[in-house]
Image (tube, rainbow, N blue to C red):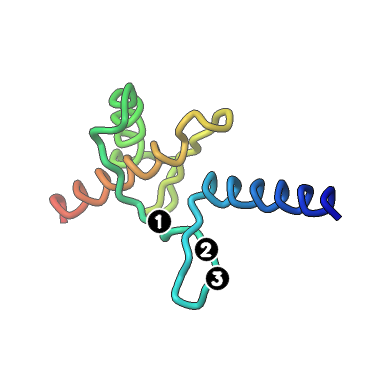
Amino acid sequence: MEFRLKSLTARLEEAVAMKDALSLVENDRGIRERPRTNSLVDESCVYGRECDKEIVLHLLMNDSDDSVGDSSVVSIVGMAGVGKTTHAQLVYTVWLILRRLVI
């Protein structure tokens, strides 16, 4: 019985550690879920992406024969953890601001 309790305790501690690592929070129904995300990025926490941001913005803002109508697609590829999503969110935020200035 002691072994089973220790085993169960170890599994529960692993579950708590995983919950904390995934930043899960408890809602009012007691069910755990991830916090909501949005496309806003704190630019002060992004390092070394200024040149990349300018390149992608240039591709999106300039008219080209490759785009269909008013739509453009730019692929951002790379290994896991290099900041592709952060980069896309940063570009999207700046692109929205620039579009509002142009319109």
Q: Residue furthest front?
A: 2
**Residue under the point 15% across and 50% down:** 102
Q: CA distance from mark 2 to mark 1?
A: 12 Å
Q: Local crowd at mark 1 within 10 Å, few (<14), some, or many (≥20)?
A: few
Residue on which disc 3 sits = 31
Q: Local crowd at mark 3 within 10 Å, few (<14), some, or many (≥20)?
A: few
Q: Secondary structure at mark 1?
A: loop
Disc marking residue 37? 1
Residue 82 versus residue 23 in the image, above or below = above
Q: Secondary structure at mark 2?
A: strand
Q: 99 and 91: which one is in front?
A: 91
Q: CA distance from mark 3 to mark 2?
A: 7 Å
**Residue under the point 39% across and 55% down:** 69
Q: Earlier in the sequence, mark 1 or mark 3?
A: 3
Give the residue type that dot 3 points to.
Answer: Ile
- Whole-percent x and y of residue 2? 82, 51
